[in-house]
C-alpha cells in the first residue's frame, strides 16, 4: 500500500470539520481578492475570538449554499452590520483588495 499525502490531508480536514461542527462552528471562509457574494445567517449569534491579529467578530455566512464562519476585524464587522441595517438585506458583496497587511474590504448590497 502506498502512502498518499492528499488522502491524509483530506482525512485530517474531515476530522477537523467534524470536530468544529460538534462545537457548533464551521470552517473559516477565506476570501479571495475580488468580489465575493455571500448571505449572512442572522439566526446564528455573532461570536468573538482573540487571535494573533487581535479581536475578530465571527459571522455565520453562506456562499454557494455552503455554510462558513467569517472572521472580520471590528471595523469591517461594523461596515457589514451597517450595510445590512441600511439596505435591510442579509445578502452582501465583500470586495477584497490588496494582500497581507495592505488588505482592505468594501461591503455593498448584493
Image (spheres, rainbow, N blue to C red):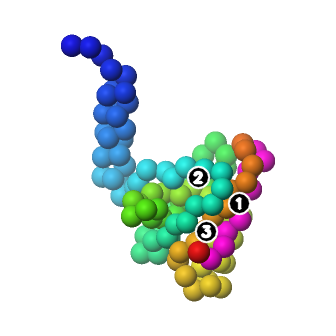
Q: Nearer the viewer, residue 17 or 24?
A: 17
Kindly identify which residue carries mark 2.
Answer: 31
For disc 1, the neighbor class at 10 Å (few under 14, some 14 to 19, many from 20) is some
Query: Considering only order in the chain, which callout, 2 or 3, is on the residue closer to the N terminus?
Result: 2
The residue mark sitting in front, 3 or 1, is: 3
Give the magenta-colored segment's residue range: 101-109
Q: Residue furthest left?
A: 1
* Depth order, front residue of 57/17: 17
Residue 52 within the magenta-colored segment of the rendering: no
Position of residue 7 relative to residue 104, above or below, is above
Q: Earlier in the sequence, mark 3 or mark 1?
A: 3
Report the Cα–Cα distance between label 3 and label 2.
11 Å
Residue that mark 3 sits on? 93
Quarter of the picture holding the C terminus: bottom right
Q: Tell me: 39 left or right of 53.
A: left
- Mark toward the start of the polypeptide (2 vs 1): 2
Amino acid at each position: 500500500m502506498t502512502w498518499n499525502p492528499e488522502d491524509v490531508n483530506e482525512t485530517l480536514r474531515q476530522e477537523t470539520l467534524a470536530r468544529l461542527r460538534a462545537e457548533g462552528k464551521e470552517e473559516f471562509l477565506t476570501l479571495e481578492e475580488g468580489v465575493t457574494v455571500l448571505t449572512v445567517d442572522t439566526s446564528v449569534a455573532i461570536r468573538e475570538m482573540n487571535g494573533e491579529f487581535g479581536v475578530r467578530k465571527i459571522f455565520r455566512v453562506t456562499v454557494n449554499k455552503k455554510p462558513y464562519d467569517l472572521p472580520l476585524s471590528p471595523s469591517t464587522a461594523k461596515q457589514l452590520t451597517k450595510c445590512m441595517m441600511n439596505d435591510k438585506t442579509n445578502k452582501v458583496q465583500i470586495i477584497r483588495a490588496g494582500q497581507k497587511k495592505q488588505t482592505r474590504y468594501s461591503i455593498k448590497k448584493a
